Image (spheres, rainbow, N blue to C red):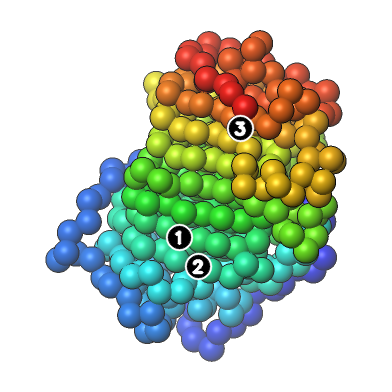
Amino acid sequence: MFRKLALGCVVSVGMALCLCAGIIALAAGTSSSFKALADDETSEWDGSEITTVWAEDGSTVDGVTTYTISSASDLAGLASLVNSGASFSGCVINLTTNINLANYAWTPIGTATVSTSSELSIVAPFEGTFNGNGNTISNLKYSDSSGACVGLFGYISDALITGVNISNVTISAEQGIGSVVGWADDASEALNINSTISDCHVTGTVEITGNHLVGGILGCGEKTSVYDCSVDTEDGSYVTGTIEISNPTVNYGDDIGGIAGFIGVTQNTGLVSKMYNVTVNNLTVKGISKVGGILGYTTVKGTDGDPFIITTKDGGTTSVTNCTITINNSLINLGFLIFTEYNSRTYIGAVLGSAYFDMTIENCDVDGVTVYYYNSACVYQADEYNGYYGGSAYGAVITLTDCTGYATTDKV
């Protein structure tokens, strides 16, 4: 789906920073429990202080270098180093404290340039492992209507982000937007490497707005897996896709999801992206097309045609509860700009908006969810599939297996 225009290289940042090689053998089942905020263990950012001295104190065991971040200014320093070209490939970053970003303008960790047609110019990805160890990062704020690759992490490649809790998020940008990761991709284009987001949880008040590729956890992920993650928010929270008025045919509020806006993978690469044990509660997910309570849109296709599955694992629960999934009603007055072209494919569902290839929704539960569609011209399978998904313009077969509950459906 995405064409890379240029590949940025790892560069020195003028200190003894180990650009590690090797594979981080962090067990897939590793989980860190949610750690509540406490005043005596929270480092508050002043919006400007950046420290990088921690990058001189890494410890190396079996070829893997581990660094420790213990303050808000250290976290800002990680963003500064990565965005200057230090990818931390193969390294581990451990967070040891809760952090309050205090609603100062955040610079995401890792950066890339994205065109209006979603072509990606790689500038500086984070390529290591970031372990939040169950600590909470609160009051994350970003506001730039032209911004792309936006979140705590802006752009990651071949990375693992795990054990991160985020409380209170306000983001307004253009595309590739998520609380934890804006954009995840495979910069190396290797067949056996991908990024993973696991055991990450978003709480509090969430207000995320963008034009394209917008999710509560992840905006856009290629060769990316998301599991053991949740978005459980306060009343009034939302993830919203709106239209770019200056160019409505390019970014028109599509690929919007409670967990992820888009997950895709190049065909037959040998990698199958995974999404399991993901839950969304008390969130409004709103957009124009390909809008889902869990996932907006997927183009995942596994080896030999193995389907992409939204499912559960090890007794976990994948669910959407007490949510509203809706067409962006505020844009209906622009009808001749949007709905003349798109009203027959506003694919929207309680779990999934749309899929390009055949896939399965397995062991999911829907409860207390209302799905609002625009009109009867929508390709929306409400009656037959209990509002779980919106359909596919590409002929994909979406199968429900062992799912419980249903969504109430209505017109906006």
What residue appears at the point 26 percent right and 70 percent down from the top-left corner? 43
Of helix, strand and loop, which one carries label 1? Answer: strand
Instruction: Name the foreground residue: 131 vs 45.
Output: 45
- Callout 3 amino acid: Val
- What number is the disc on residue 71? none
Q: Residue at x 79, y 40 (%)?
A: 339
Q: Please name whichever residue, 163 or 15, is drawn nearer the observer in this view of the structure.
A: 163
Residue 273, x across and y down, in percent: 63, 37
Which numbered dot is residue 142? 2
**Residue at x 69% of width, y 37% of height:** 290
Number of other residues with Cα within 10 Å of mark 2, as a class: few under 14, some 14 to 19, many 20 or more: many
CA gap, disc 2 to disc 3?
A: 30 Å
Residue depicted at x 45% and y 66%: 141
Type of the residue with mark 1: Thr
Foreground disc of the pair 1, 3:
3
Say which amino acid is labelled 2: Tyr
Which residue in the structure is indicated by mark 1?
A: 170
Earlier-in-chain disc, 2 versus 1: 2
Mark with earlier residue (2, 3)? 2
Label 3 sits on residue: 412
Could you tell me residue 37's position as x and y percent? 22, 56
